[in-house]
Amino acid sequence: GDVIQDFVFPVANSDNGAEVTVTISGDLSGIDNLGAKDTIAITAGGPNGWVDTMMTRSELQAHIDDPISNPISLFLPSKGEWNINIEPGWNNGPMKGDWVSVDWMSPPGENVKVTDTGSFIASPASVNFNISGADQTLSGIVTDQDGNTIANAEIYAYAPTGDMGGNHTNTSAIGTYSLKLPEGLYMVGSWADGYPAKEEVAVELKEGTIKVDGQIIASLNIKMKAPAYTIS
């Protein structure tokens, strides 16, 4: 008969993980949507796992107002390099692709190193992030080589200088997208099932305008070309 094996994954805590204190500052008043169900995720990815915690708007605001009384702690359960981030909350997990369009941009991640000297110790033991609204809009439509719109394509943008984070969204049922970002220079790319990766485009957003190759454009429309063959 079938063999059923139950797996138990231990939750890291102060007894078996390195504690990292996360402090978030910023102004939420200009942010209409933090993420799915108006939440953010504080995440850490390391050599042997993934740790995350979700916060509602009210919990995040309470932390910003008084981080001492409302601390945020992550416990990292193995030694090695970990990358800590804050990002829009999700509905069904970070790998489900159900990204929600938001009007703020995740700041760059912070790296910490966990060592084991009889107990796990993180260095640095605290990281800081600032969250603020994004006031520029990058929009357009995604089509294939025949002009057919592509639904649920992922559109992403990141700052190549590394001094800012990035943002991403999915196209609507009619292939349109809208991405909120602060002023700056970005590399913009797209991805969709059944299509090869599209070459990224350098875009400048400034004072409500979109520039590509120094020319102001009304929108960034992306054309993706399906391969001429399939593998079966």
Image (cartoon, rainbow, N blue to C red):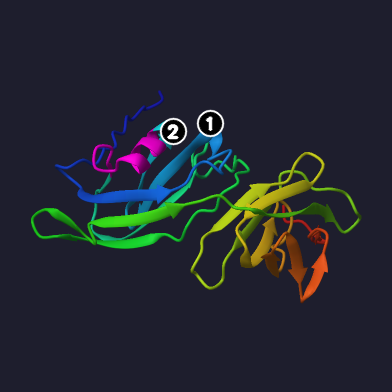
Q: Residue placed at 73% from the left, 46% from the top?
A: 171
| Residue placed furthest toward the left | 118
- In the rendering, which numbered label is found on residue 37? 1
Q: Residue placed at 91% from the left, 55% from the top?
A: 146
Q: Tags 1 and 2 in contact by the CB under 8 Å rule?
A: yes
- Pick the residue in front: 216 or 213: 216
Q: Residue placed at 34% from the left, 63% from the top?
A: 111
Cα distance, mark 1 to mark 2? Answer: 8 Å
| Range shown magenta | 59-72
Q: Which residue is mark 2?
A: 56
- Location of residue 151 (image quadrant): top right
Label 1: few (<14), some or many (≥20) within 10 Å? some
Query: Was residue 66 drawn as part of the magenta stretch in this picture?
Result: yes
- Looking at the rendered structure, the kind of residue marked 2 is Thr
40 left or right of 123 in image: right
Rendering coords of residue 10 (x, y %): 25, 37
- Pick the residue in front: 226 or 127: 127
Mark 1 or 2, nearer chain start:
1
Q: Residue placed at 79% from the left, 53% from the top?
A: 140
178 left or right of 32 in image: right
Q: Quadrant of the N terminus?
A: top left
- Looking at the rendered structure, the kind of residue marked 1 is Lys
Rendering coords of residue 110 (x, y %): 37, 61
Query: Was residue 187 drawn as part of the magenta stretch in this picture?
Result: no
Asked if residue 132 shows in the view, the reply is yes
Rendering coords of residue 219 (x, y %): 80, 58
- Secondary element at tag 1: helix
- Pick the residue in front: 62 or 105: 62
| Residue placed furthest toward the right | 146
